[in-house]
Structure formats: C-alpha cells, structure tokens
Image (cartoon, rainbow, N blue to C red):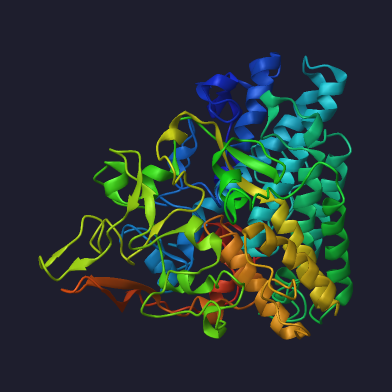
Amino acid sequence: MKKYYYILIAGCTIAALQSCKKGGFLDPKVEPLTEAKVFADSTLTMSFLTDIYAYTGMDIIPSCTYISGSSTGLGTIDDNFETMTTNVAAGYSSGPQIPLLTSALTSNTHVFNPYYTAYYKRIRSANIFMKNIPGSTLSSSRKLRVIAEARFLRAWYYFALVRLYGGVQLMGDEVSDELPTYEYKRNTYKQCIDYISTELDEAAKNLPTSLALEAADYGRATSGACKALKARVLVTGASPLYNGNPVATDATTGPLLSYSASADQTLWQKAADACKVVLDLPEYALVEDNVTKPGYGFWNMFVSSRKNSEYIFAYNVAVGKNLETMWFPWSRTGVSSLTYSNPSENMVKAFGMKDGKPITASSAAYPYSAANPYVNRDPRFDYSIVYNQALVCNRATTSLDKVDIFFNKATNAVSTDGYATYHTRTGYYNRKMCNDAAPYNSLSIDRAYPMIRLAEMILGYAEALNELGQTENAVTYVIRIRRRAGILAGSDNRYGIPAGISQSDARGLIQNEYRVEFFSEGHWYYDTRRWRTAEMTEAQPVTGTVVTRELNGTFTYAPITAINSAFLKSSYFAPIPLTEVLKGKGHLIQNPGW
C-alpha cells in the first residue's frame, strides 16, 4: 500500500479532454502537472476527473494498452476478465490465464496484485479531487456534479477491490502522502458493502439522468449508473459466497469475507428492490429487433454507436481501436499475429437451441446433433462465436462467406484459420461485440464497451425473485431476455422454459442465462465466485474442438484440451499482495489459503 500513499500529484499524468470527433471522453493526451495548477484551471480540473475514469473498464477492455496515455502497470494482462475463466483460451500461452486457472500463483506473484495498487491510486485521486473542488474555478452547480462523479468513481473502485478481495480498508477522505496514523487493516465485508451503497445514494442526488446527458459527456456517471451499480453491489452481497455459505467462519476472518454467516433472505429483498428501481427508470430499454433477423438488436447495440437505450454505464473506445483485429480469424483481419480470445467448447455448449432448450435436452423440432453441432442454435451463438463454416465478411470482397477452421485430409494441411498456434487454441474465434457484417467499418465508428447494461438489472431482478421463492415471477423477466435474443416463443410462450420449473432448476437456468448473455463482458469470473460454483465450472478443463474435413467433404469433430484447470477453494478470493500484508504489521489479515 506504500505506493498508494506516496503517489504525489506532481508526478501524476493528467489526461486532457479531446473533442468528440477525436474519440471524445477517455481519449486523452497526457502532461505532467502540479496540483495547484490543475485546480486553478477549469479545463485541467475536468481533465483530472477524466483520468480517474480510465481504469473503470478493466473487466471488459480487450487489452490494457487501450487505456490511452496512461501507464497501467498491470503486467501482461492482454485481455479482459473472460480469459481468467474457462469460457475462453487466451491466444497466447505465456500470459496470466494458465497460472491462474491451474492455481500456480502465490500471494507474491498473483496476477491481480497490480490491481490492488491501481484501484487504490484511483480512490486517492478521487479524494484529492473532492478536496480541491470547493476552491476550484468551476461554477457552483458544476462543483456539485463533479463531486458526485468522483464519489461514484470512488465507490466503483472500492467495489472493484471488494469483488476480488472481500473486505478492504476504507480510507474515507484520506489524501495524505504518508501512511495513516491509524492501523492499516481491513474493514468488514458488510461495512464495505454498506459504505459503497450509501456513497452511491449520495452521488445519485447530484448527477443527471442519461436523458439529460449531453453528447460530449457520454460515458460519464449518471444517476442511473449510481442506482445500477448499487443494484450490482447488493445482488453480489446477497449471493451465496457472502450470504450464508462463507469460505471462512472464524471470528477474525469470517466477517472480512461475508455479509452474513447465516442465510439472510432480507439481503435478496434489498437486491430485488434495488434492481426494480433501475427497471422502473424511464430512460432504459432493451435494444430489441427481431424483424431484421432473430436477435439482431442484441448484435446491433454493440456495434452501431456509443449510445443506446440499454447501456447504463459504458467505457468509450477511441476510434481505430477495435476488437475485430484482435479476435477475428487472420483471413478476415489481414493481420498475422495472435488472436487474443478463443472461445472454449465449455462456452459453446452453454448456448442452447433456437427454441430455448439446452443442448442436453433439445426438442424433436430443433434437435442438437454432435455431427452438425452449430445449426438451430440460440441466435446469440452466431453473434458471439466464429465456428467452422460460419459466415463472416470477406475483407477483400466485402461479401459474407464461410470461414474455414479445419484440418483438410485431402491436402493433409490445416486451413488458413484452422487449429494452430497463434490462430486458435480451441477451434473457435470470438465474435462478441464485433462488427461481423463489415469488419473494419468499426474503425471509423465511435464505440463503447458496456460495463453495466439493462439486461444485467433484469437478470439480477429475476435471480433475486427466484431466491425469494417467486420463481414464476422470475421466469417472466428471463423471458424478456430470451425474447430480445430472438429465441422462439413456442406454443406456450415460455421461450423454452419448462412450465412449473422448480426454484433449483430456475437458479441453474438463470445462471446459464448470465453466462450466455454476458459472454466476454467480464461477468463470468465474478459470477462463478459469488454463486460459489467456481469449484465446479472453473475446475473443468478448458476444451475445444478440432474439425476435420474428410475426403468426402463432410466434417467430423474431435475434442481437445487447451488447459487442464485445477481450481482451489482459496481462489474464491484473490490474495492481498504479500508486500501489503507485511506493511500491515500483523493487522492486515490475509485471505484464507494464501
């Protein structure tokens, strides 16, 4: 933690705002500035605030280098949090995924250690900002708003820490460059969740709605973002890992890692209420278009522009920085380098059929066939996964044609995009959030990654209702997600959900819906932990499929293993970095197993 307290403002890099045409908010220049100079100039003051936003996208951005003008110090993390799970295989074998999934890390070498310092630095920056704003040159109304933004960001980073570590030390408004005079020790999980929730309530009072947000400010915090983040916080706090199923029960460590040692249904009610607040806001709606083709709205919201009715909080992407280059097959990018994210067979099998049935219980009308596995699937499958013979725009002809991902027996050679080092480690490529109709058009389109969108609030509400015993009510909200996805309603209008579904089966269905809906958006790592299911899902090997084109032109499919995972229960929480524990002089308690 010493680095956190000794970061001087004179050594900070301040991001200067760019015009919207240059990429807008979060597309910065950098220059070294002193604290006095920053807060004596309104433009520099706002630039300081912009710089605090830079790390909000760490769960979803495809590479740390996307944080323009800011040195992340986050090591070799070259992909988003999906590569910390069994949902994908990273395109490289030397990054953090394998040691993380095989539990080969220590508290001194853990891949998340840099996050601890990075997030606390942003918390301190928010405190510096709020301390200096009263004496700045901003108008009175502007001061109220930007203080609220900084308060939201401070809450965001605290929750980022809590999701990884459990209870962490709450610093209040501390801005000293020296270590605090009070003990360096962790607050309880409950104290952290309650503090974050209260801070978000306070921030929401002085922030505009998304409807009132000017175009140049898109990507900044709104009152809706505060309410949605609070809903996420409370859904997390009500989840099994923190509510009645703790990994530690001793009086010292237990309170650091759980809100309640025994199951408390009132936490689910609070979570449901918080989600419903967001659902009742007039400015948000699912992006739905099943007329153009099934599930088209699900794809279009990611690629058409930065702003839409579903994004509640988003991370702006500079023009020219795109997922397609890093995720698409080489034949489509024209770039001979590694592909960052290869979806696993684990993930592929999570997608059901077009009538909503899982592949393990498919219907006679839309049967799953291992000999022809990619037909009649949930429309989100085609919008998320590039598989053998999938249609993707040809870079040279701009027409849609089939991608060859196979070993060709006739030529005894691998096709251009077949299973090979730096191409694909699983037999699949990632298409989620990509412009698959005309790749590289996105180079000239303002884009944003969704960090919170309405679909999460809907599924969070469904999850909470189910845990409260209101399963049929919960089903109606899951149906909203499936209808938008383009899944067939069926004669019973239940979109593949069995009549009379039990609470337990609904729980599994909702969890799988999270997995499919939010693939590659940075959710699965956290979800498998809060549900305490990681010891099952993340202990499975990361698998793939090698496709062979036989001499008669048909395809056969053979399973492969990309990574042999070995999940340990200690991995439900990341370790507090060893260097920080040593600074705590016995007061900073380490997480169990580390």
400 left or right, relative to 1:
left
- Seen from the viewer's position, the closer of residues 332 and 125 is 332
Residue 537, horizontal then vertical, whole percent: 52, 78
Residue closest to the far left: 411
Q: Position of residue 418 (x, y in %)?
A: 25, 61
| Residue 569 visible in the shown view | no
Q: Which residue is drawn at 54% across and 31% down?
A: 446
Q: Which of 440 and 539 is in front in this view?
A: 440
When asked about the image quadrant of residue 427, the answer is bottom left
In this rendering, the answer to whether 389 lies above or below 27 is below
Is residue 411 shown above or below 246?
Answer: above
The percent position of residue 221, horizontal first and vertical second, equals: 73, 37
For the question of whether residue 437 can be seen, the reply is: yes
**Left or right position of 437 against 449:** left
Q: Residue at x 32, y 51 (%)?
A: 329
- What residue is shown at x 33% (from left), y 63% (from top)? 388
